[in-house]
Image: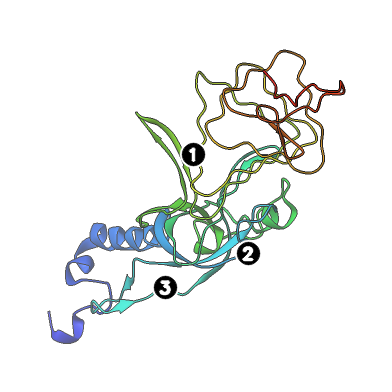
Amino acid sequence: MASTDIPSGQLQPEDSWGEYNRTTFVIRQLLNRIQTVTLVRVDAVTNAGGVSPVGFVDVTPLVNQIDSDGHPVPHATIYGIPYSRLQGGANAVIIDPAIGDIGICGFASRDISHVKATQAQANPGSFRTFDYADGLYIGGALNGTPTQYVQFSTAGITLHSPTAIVLSAPDVSISASTVEIAATTSTTVTTPTFSVNGATVLNGTLNQTGGGTASISGSMSVAGDVHANGTSLHTHTHTSTTPGTPTSAPL
């Protein structure tokens, strides 16, 4: 075979040898146009952790294309890819993708553009199949160590945040054998009423401010002294109203 007869591009010399090889080459080229799943980098996100409908991401496939000479051809950005969220009805875990995330992107077998636009059953927007434009961002992979997380392990469940954790509900109930709160600075409870059903031990100073009234229905035992408006219950004296009777202290 002369040098001018050697095929160029992705067609190799052996691909032109016989009808079978030629047909196999055509089938292989068609299969190469089918997109399945690949790793992508998130370049933009419509949401940033807020309470909102599921949004979209712009992604770039990370596995380069290769031309017939072995030169890399990076992919262009794919815009407006829906991302998945763990959600059922109005109940959801909101963890939006972040710029720079690496994740898995799958590609639908048909054009999903009409369903994306209407969020309802619809005909395909075109006759394209297994195309990059019909991607679905499934979630993260190959990402780094998180700093905010819910951790499940044999030791139990850990809920960790470097900033704040907020519980918001009409009713919050905690049921456990023991409950411990360890605050390194302070603990504040703001409520119209505060009830403790059970024996209570205070290891520290008790201060009551705001002009409220303390009422105790049972007896009260104090190991030390009690002061009322600056007067000691233990050491204050009484002046006798009977002439010749000295001042006395409480027993």
Q: Secondary structure beneath disc 3?
A: loop
Whether residue 17 is visible, yes or no, is yes
Sequence order check, earlier mark of 1 and 2: 2
Q: Which quadrant of the figure has residue 112?
A: bottom right
Q: Amino acid at mark 1?
A: Ala
Q: Earlier in the sequence, mark 1 or mark 3?
A: 3
Q: Answer yes or no: do the residues labelled 3 and 2 have beta carbons within 8 Å?
A: no
Q: Earlier in the sequence, mark 3 or mark 2?
A: 2
Q: Find the residue positioned furthest to the top.
A: 218
Nearer to us of marks 1 and 3 is: 1
Occupied quadrant, residue 9: bottom left
Q: Is residue 175 above or below residue 59?
A: above
Looking at numbered disc 3 in the image, what kind of residue is underneath it?
His
Q: Please name the residue that numbered disc 2 is placed on.
A: 46
- Looking at the image, which residue is at 70% across and 37% down? 89
User: Is residue 81 found left or right of 75 in the rendered image?
Assistant: right
The residue identified by callout 1 is 182
Q: Is residue 211 positioned above or below 30 on the image?
A: above
Instruction: Classify the position of the N terminus by image quarter.
Output: bottom left
Q: Quadrant of the C terminus?
A: top right
Label for residue 75?
A: 3
Q: CA distance from mark 1 to mark 3?
A: 51 Å
Instruction: Give me the C-alpha separation between circle 1 and circle 2.
Output: 38 Å
- Location of residue 142 in the rendering, given as x and y in whole percent from the top left corner: 34, 56
Residue 87: quadrant of the picture: top right
